[in-house]
Amino acid sequence: MGYRLKRILVLASAGLVLIVIASYIRDRTLEMQKAGRAVEEAERLVHLGKLEAAIEVLDRAVKVGPAFFEARESLSHLYTMAGRPGKGIEVLQQGAKLFPRDSRIYLALGSACAAPPVNDYEKAVFYLEKTIRLDPRNLCARNLLARCYNWHGEREEARRQVEEILKLDASNAAALAARRSLERAAKRAEPVGVPRMSESFEGTRKRPKSLLRRR
């Protein structure tokens, strides 16, 4: 095979690869746009009080665009609002299987397990620790983990997490308030596990941005 022919084949192969990549990017972009529109539609339905219809819209969006985290997180939150928190957690767990390196999924799982009506602090700690292994600088995860440790009776672990947060951000308001709360609790020799940090960590679990305006 001559040099010229080899060069033509190489260029043709490279061109084919570029076409495939461009096609993939285009398809993914369209997929994300559809999922984004679904989140907006779900928000509109929620404002109209049509919670089940919003769930159906987001459920379809997650199936079409499984990588679209915001749609999955919003769907999980809507299931909780509808009194089906277990289904909401299942949606997030499916995401964790598909994208095991996405720390956002584990933070959402930890938040869902820690929040009422689930209140499963052991599972919350498991998911939040996984979040931090993937994203050590995630202060939201560390703040929530400290609260869960305290509620689960592991006050020293809670204190350690608070100090880790302050190493990363010395002015972190939630961590500073939690440190003061822990110090006061230690002076009063309160029973371990009493949830004294709830006010310090108020708002640690954020609702999906697309649904913040409800209520």
Image (spheres, rainbow, N blue to C red):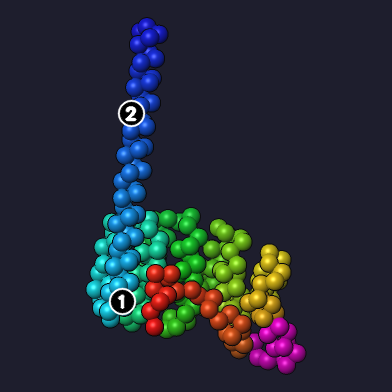
**Residue sitting nearer the eye, 123 or 48:** 48
Who's the residue at 56% across and 74% down the image?
A: 144
- Circle 2 sits in a helix, a strand or a loop, which is it? helix
Residue 178 quadrant: bottom right
Tell me how far mark 2 sits from mark 1, CA to CA: 45 Å
The relative height of residue 116 versus residue 100 in the rendered view (above or below) is below
Where does residue 19 sit, x and y in percent of width and height?
A: 33, 33
Asked if residue 139 is among those painted magenta in the image, a careful observer would answer no
Q: Amino acid at mark 2?
A: Leu
Residue 204 quadrant: bottom right
Q: Is residue 152 visible?
A: no
Where does residue 6 sit, x and y in percent of width and height?
A: 38, 13
Q: Amino acid at mark 1?
A: Val
User: Left or right of 59: which side holds 80?
Assistant: right
Where does residue 169 sit, x and y in percent of width and height?
A: 68, 67
Of the two numbered discs 2 and 1 in the rendering, the one whose residue sits closer to the viewer: 1
Where does residue 51 sit, x and y in percent of width and height?
A: 28, 77
Mark 2, residue position: 16
Labels 2 and 1: the sequence-earlier one:
2
**Residue sitting nearer the eye, 37 or 95:** 37
How many residues crowd mark 2 within 10 Å: few (<14), some (14–19), many (20+)?
few
Q: Mark number for residue 46?
A: 1
Residue 142 quadrant: bottom right
What residue span does the magenta drawing correspond to? 180-192
Q: Is residue 68 visible?
A: yes
